[in-house]
Image: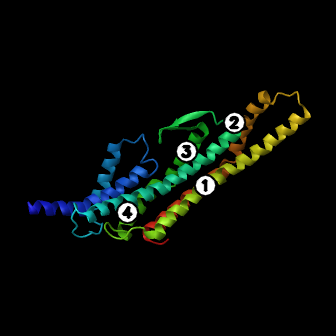
Amino acid sequence: MFAEYFELEALVNEFVLPFCRIGAMLMAAPMFGARLVPARVRIVLALVLAASLAAIIPSPGTIDPLSAAGFLMVAQEILIGATMGFMVQMVFDAVIIGSQTIAMSMGLGFAMLVDPQRGMNVPILSQFFIILTTMMFLALNGHLILIEVLVRSFITLPPGGASFGTDGIWTVVSWGTQMFAGAILIALPAVVALLVVNLAYGVISRAAPTLNLFAVGFPSTILLGFVILQYSLQTTLAGLTNMLDNVFLALRALSSGVT
């Protein structure tokens, strides 16, 4: 009986703790945590990664899995993994916020579509930007970089060892400001251009009061909005690339303890 209990302790120390961190990251990260990805697929992927990394992960020592310390270690591993995935997810949330602002300026705020990743209604323009961001994420090998950072975190932040600490938590909170800054950078070119268009329509309405702006201005604003998006696409892609690079740098700094 005691031998089986010690085997359970070894299993928890060498396998379950890394599995909790990996599984939490896969649940919170974009693409891996999408609603289209079945939970069984995420569990199997977490099991495969945990088994592959079992030989290189430092052992936390002998810890009773049913003790308060054991439960705290599991909670700590879940927190570390979820934090890493959540920081990358905030980049996609910034894209949604920025694209919603553009859609409202264009008059497309009423055109809603179900986001398959979250299962919620978002403007159809937001879905276009989500697809664009996903393609950029894959083109930059973001999924591989995320797994690489996760693997390195087991060396710098071994299971049962130190966590992010106060400075690391503050870094995660501060990264939230980057989400709103990124949303503004994505929406600013189109919103400013559409503001000029609306001001022009205001001048036209004063010069020709009999002109029905609802029949002319509404479709022309949507058309001009798509033209503006086309010409500002290069700036948008550069902003998305910069945001993804910054979040990868922040994850590397966070997992290595440099904050």
The N terminus lies in quadrant? bottom left
Disc on res. 180: 1
Classify mark 4: helix, strand or loop.
Answer: helix
Q: How far is disc 1 from disc 3 in space, using C-alphas?
A: 16 Å
Q: Are marks 1 and 3 in contact (CB under 8 Å)?
A: no
Q: Are marks 3 and 2 in contact (CB under 8 Å)?
A: no
Q: How far is disc 3 from disc 2 in space, using C-alphas?
A: 19 Å
Identify which amino acid the numbered label 2 is placed on: Gly
Residue under numbered circle 4: 151
Mark before the other along the chain sequence, 4 or 2:
2
Q: How packed is label 2: few (under 14 Cα within 10 Å), some, or many (20 or more)?
A: some
Q: Quadrant of residue 36?
A: top left
Mark before the other along the chain sequence, 1 or 3:
3
Mark before the other along the chain sequence, 4 or 3:
3
Q: How far is disc 4 from disc 2 in space, using C-alphas?
A: 45 Å
Foreground: disc 4 or disc 2: 2
Residue under numbered circle 2: 107
User: Can see residue 160?
Assistant: yes
Q: Position of residue 85 (x, y in %)?
A: 44, 55
Identify which amino acid the numbered label 1 is placed on: Phe
Identify which amino acid the numbered label 3 is placed on: Ile
Foreground: disc 1 or disc 3: 1
Q: Are marks 1 and 2 in contact (CB under 8 Å)?
A: no
Residue extending furthest toward the front: 68
Q: Position of residue 175 (x, y in %)?
A: 54, 61
Judge by depth and name the residue closer to the eye, 95 or 170: 170
Classify mark 2: helix, strand or loop.
Answer: loop
Taking the image as shown, residue 196 lies to the left or right of residue 184, namely right
Classify mark 1: helix, strand or loop.
Answer: helix
Mark before the other along the chain sequence, 3 or 2:
2
Disc on res. 130: 3
